Amino acid sequence: MDEPTFYRFLIWGFLVIAALIFPALFFITAPYGRHETKSWGPTIDNRLGWLLMESPSVLVFFACWYLGGCPTDPASLGFLFLWQLHYVHRAFIFPFRIKSGPKRMPIAIAAAAFTFTSLNGYLNGRWLFGFAGADRHGSAWLSDPRFFLGAAIFLAGFAINQQADWILLHLRKPGETGYKIPRGGFYRWVSCPNYFGEIIEWVGFAICTWSLPGVAFALWTIANLLPRARSHHRWYREKFPDYPPERKALVPGLF
Ligand code: NDP
């Protein structure tokens, strides 16, 4: 099988799995963080898990750029910048900012996420710096409104995600491991603005790249984070009797 055929199988398989996982995640909540359970087998350190499961996004995407001949046209550099802006932080900075004490996560979760980020980095990077080629995203793409609009949406989502995570990561004093009600920023309106921002980012990236792998990644992010936001929201309401009743789970004013 040649690589373009393999790629086509992979991307359609990726979409089918996202469609299957979406309803399943309303019934199964990935057991890490506040939803941690002992029943998912052997575990690893939480920080190490984050580092391992997110680093393929940086490395595989960068490898695709390198193997694509290190394109330096502005559109390619723009895609590389946006992607790495998010993932260098998520893989190599975020794990050292979390204050979870000696928390652990199941190896099964880290392994599933490692597989996902490797495939996702390949699907997006190989398309943008290989199969799509300069014909698809040449210099003209820079003056296309989809590029600017998508990049602006991505950056807005990035800002919301960063602010929301910053608020969460400052709720605990050194040594604390419990949970508090987050306030301020988008927490005025929703329980999970970090997930809301993350979804906006990848919808923006899909628009900016105008690509099927970009759309597939945005759909995966929604399939993963929408059910998890509902689980977090339900958990907050059960745990805190004074939880703000007007707050929605994920999207301000909607749900
Ligand atoms: P959470 O909101 O569950 O937790 C983020 C961090 O804040 C954790 O260290 C958590 O500690 C801590 N925290 C959360 N709520 C509270 C609280 N009420 N009081 C005190 N501390 C709190 O997010 P995730 O861990 O699921 O995700 C982290 C980041 O990764 C997010 O930005 C998310 O968008 C992104 N992500 C992206 C995915 C994708 O599909 N693209 C998938 C999953 C995550 P603890 O670990 O102890 O709960």
Image (cartoon, grey):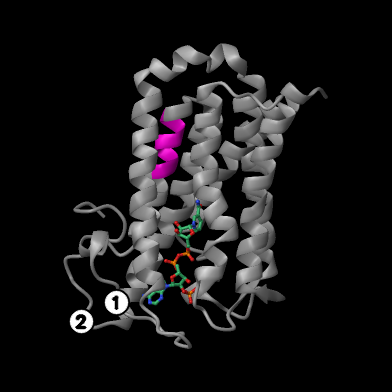
The answer to whether the beta carbon of the residue marked 2 is less than 8 Å from any atom of ligand 1 is: no
Q: Is residue 91 left or right of residue 111?
A: left
How many numbered marks are there? 2
From the viewer's perspective, is residue 201 above or below residue 88? above
* Viewer-side label of 2, 1: 1
Give the amino acid type for the residue marked by disc 2 in the picture: Asp
In the rendered image, which quarter contains the C terminus? bottom left
Q: Quadrant of residue 153?
A: top left
Q: Main secondary structure of the magenta part?
A: helix
Find residue 46 and report its image quarter.
Answer: bottom right
In percent of width and height, residue 6 lies at 74, 28
Mark 1: C-beta under 8 Å from nearest atom of ligand 1: yes
Q: What residue is pinned by disc 2?
A: 242
Residue 226 disc label: none
Residue 116 position, x and y percent, is: 63, 49
- Residue 233 position in % (x across, y down): 33, 68
Residue sitting at x 62%, y 81% = 38
* Mark 1: amino acid: Ile
In space, the residues marked 2 and 1 are separated at their CA atoms by 9 Å
The local secondary structure at tag 1 comes to: loop
Image quarter in which the N terminus is found:
top right
Residue 180 visible in the current orientation: yes
